[in-house]
Image (cartoon, rainbow, N blue to C red):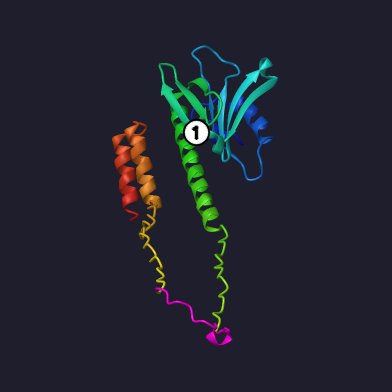
């Protein structure tokens, strides 16, 4: 069955099948559905709200008109600021925080589904930010360098004394005191040393995984044993 991978955490098969049919028509080339979380209220809910995560976007889905229509709130990863969830007595409340506009929440999401949603969305947001930073660095490096052209003033040749005509006056002029010329010495300008650019240290892949693993443990999303086992596995790759 095509929906088998979307019902491993207790999702309703019929609702998932109906939702997948609608989402498939909205997928772009190279895009695929990664996870679907369904609302599960204490009372019976025939058509629950849901959150679907693809490789490029996140879909908040609400069935209306007895399932004949569906309202979608769709965000690409670059339009999302963060994701949050709060565990309550009956399931969890998952909140999508966009860069602009109001926060959108769906409650009564089963806790295990909410945790997986959080992990998937957090990972996608982190990868999107890294990709954006990499593109900015590439654009900065690829900017054309404008050459600096030094313009020199044309030198005016000094007139040779042989080209100057002298006339001898009939009566020699009275002697005058010699005229002294003073040329102001240039004022030395202080030399300002430019600080050397600080290269940003980029963590390697294993360090990033260890940090992400520690973040999951601090938020109590994984147990101590799971944390230690995964940490030892990553450290063995060094």
Quadrant the N terminus occupies: top right
Up the image or down, 178 lies above or below 119; here it is below
* Snapshot quadrant of residue 212: top left
User: Residue at position x 50%, y 32% from top?
Assistant: 8
Q: In this view, does 130 lie above or below 172?
A: above
Which is the main secondary structure of the residues drawn in magenta?
Answer: loop
In the rendered structure, the answer to whether residue 70 lies left or right of residue 38 reads right
Q: Which of 160 and 29 is in front in this view?
A: 160
Picture residue at 51% right of the left edge, 16% below the top? 41
Residue at the top extreme?
43
Question: Circle 1: is it few (<14), some (14-19), or many (20+) Cα within 10 Å?
Answer: few
- Which quadrant holds the C terminus? bottom left
How far from the left and from the top, in percent, is residue 4? 56, 34
Boundaries of the magenta span: 161-177
Residue of label 1: 81
Farthest residue to the front: give it: 171
x and y percent of residue 30 in the render?
63, 45
């Amino acid at each position: 069955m095509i929906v088998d991978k979307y019902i491993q955490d207790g999702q309703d098969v019929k609702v998932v099948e109906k939702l997948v049919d609608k989402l498939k028509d909205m997928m772009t080339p190279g895009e695929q559905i990664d996870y679907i979380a369904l609302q599960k209220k204490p009372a019976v809910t025939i058509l629950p709200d849901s959150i679907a995560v693809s490789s490029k976007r996140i879909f908040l889905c609400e069935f209306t008109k007895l399932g004949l229509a569906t309202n979608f709130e769709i965000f690409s990863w670059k339009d999302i600021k963060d994701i949050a969830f709060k565990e309550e007595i009956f399931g969890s409340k998952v909140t999508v925080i966009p860069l602009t506009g109001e926060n959108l929440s769906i409650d009564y999401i089963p806790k295990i589904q909410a945790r997986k949603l959080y992990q998937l969305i957090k990972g996608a947001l982190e990868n999107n930010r890294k990709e954006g930073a990499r593109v900015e660095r590439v654009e900065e490096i690829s900017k054309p360098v404008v050459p600096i052209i030094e313009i020199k003033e044309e030198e005016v040749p000094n007139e040779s004394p042989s080209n100057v005509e002298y006339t001898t006056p009939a009566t020699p002029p009275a002697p005058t005191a010699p005229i002294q010329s003073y040329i102001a010495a240039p004022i030395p300008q202080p030399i300002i040393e430019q600080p050397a650019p600080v290269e940003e240290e980029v963590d390697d892949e294993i360090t990033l995984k260890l940090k992400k693993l520690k973040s999951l443990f601090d938020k109590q999303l994984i147990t101590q044993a799971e944390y230690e086992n995964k940490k030892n596995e990553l450290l063995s790759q060094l």
